[in-house]
Image (cartoon, rainbow, N blue to C red):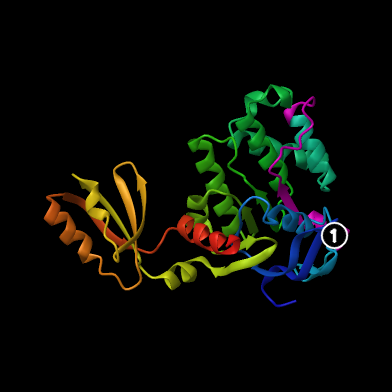
Amino acid sequence: MEKGAAVVLTGVSKRFDTVTAVNHFSLRIAEGSLFGLLGPNGAGKTTTLRMILRIMLPDEGSIELLGRPHNDAAQDLMGYLPEERGLYTQMKVREVLVFLAALKGLAESEARRRVDDWLERFELTAWADRKVVDLSKGMQQKVQFIVAVIHRPPVLVLDEPFTGLDPVNAALVKDIMLELRRNGATVILSTHRMEQVEMMCDSICLINKGESVLEGELAAIKRSYGKNTVRLEATGDGDFLNLPGVVRSLNQFGTLTEAKLEPGADPQEILKAAVARGVRITRFELVEPPLNDIFIEKVGEGRA
C-alpha cells in the first residue's frame, strides 16, 4: 500500500444479480484528508462506502485500510454515520451511547465521560435520560454523529451528515469535522450538498454508474476548468444576457446570476450589452465554475 494513504481500493466490483453497482473501481484517499465521494442517486456511492466499512465484501478487487488488511479487526478503526439512522429508539440517549461505545471497546467509565462531554457540546445534556424516540430528527442526527466519533476512529465515514440539521447545528458539525481532520483523522464525506464539499474537501471523486468520472484535488479540478463563469448582480432588463456565442447557460439565484461563458468568449461583451440596454451592474466577477456546475456537466456526460 502506498505510504500516506488511509484507504486504497483497487479494481473493486460489486454486483447484485444482473446489476453492477460498482465496476472495477479504484481509489486512493490520503491519510489526514477530508475527502468527498460524490455522485447522483444510484451511482454506487453507498455500496462503495459499505465495502470500505466491510458491511459488504467486494466480488472482485481489494481494499486496504491504513496499511492493514481489510479484515474484521479493521472495523474498529472506522466510525460510520449512515444516511439512515440506526439507533435503538426505545433506549435512553445516554444509555444507547454508552452501550454503542462499549461495543467499540471503551470501558464503561471512559465511555460515560466521553458521552457526557459530547452531549454537552451538542447541547443535549437535558435530553440524556429521555428515550431516543422523543428526540427531534435533528437531535437524533446529532446523537448518531456522536456514535460515529465516540471511539476516536482514525477513519470516519459520514453519509449525508447534515440531514435534518438547522444552520446552527450544521455549522457545528462542519466545525467538528474540520477539527477531527486537524487532529489527524481521515474524513470521508458523501453528500449532495455541493456547497459544503466546495468549502471543506481537499479532494473528491465523482462516481457515476459505478465508475469514477472525475477524481483529484478539488482546487486543481476547478483550476482546470478556468475562470469561465461570470457572477453578477444587475438591475434592469435581464434579457441583455441572451448573447449567442458569448453566454452558454444561465443559473439564476434571485438577484444573483451566474453566466457560464462559451469557450474563448470575452466576458467584457456582457458589460457592453448591459450598457447598451441601460442595465446597471452592481456586481461583476469572473470566477471558476462552482462544483455544482461541474457535477451536472460530468454526470450529464455519463448519461449521454
Q: How many labels, in total?
A: 1
Q: Position of residue 174 (x, y in %)?
A: 54, 47
Q: Amino acid at mark 1?
A: Leu
Q: Is residue 277 visible?
A: yes
Residue at image coords 59%, 63%: 302
- 272 sits left or right of 142 in the view: left
Asked where in the image residue 39 lies, by quadrant, the reply is bottom right
Q: Is residue 288 left or right of residue 22?
A: left
Magenta residue check for 190: no
| Side of 41 relative to 296 (left or right) | right
Q: Examine the rendered structure and indicate whether residue 63 appears above or below residue 150.
A: below
Residue sitting at x 60%, y 32% = 138
Q: Residue at x 78, y 30 (%)?
A: 95
Name the residue at the bottom extreme. Answer: 2
Which sits in the foreground, 146 or 107? 146
What residue is pinned by disc 1?
Answer: 57
Q: Quick one: SS at disc 1?
A: loop
Q: Residues within 10 Å of mark 1 (few under 14, many from 20)?
A: some
Look at the image and tell me in which quarter the C terminus lies.
bottom right
Give how far across and how far down residue 238 sits, in percent. Answer: 24, 47
Quadrant in the picture for the N terminus: bottom right
Q: Provide residue 213's location: percent of width, then percent of height.
A: 60, 67
- Residue 279 picture location, percent across and down: 15, 49
Report which quarter residue 146 is drawn in: top right
* Residue 204 shows in this picture: no
Q: Residue at x 35, y 47 (%)?
A: 252
Relative to the observer, which residue lies in front, 223 or 257?
Answer: 257
Taking depth in this image into account, of 91 and 205 the one nearest to the observer is 205
- The magenta region covers 71-93
Relative to 48, does residue 25 appear above or below in the rendering?
below
Which residue occupies the extreme right position in the image?
72
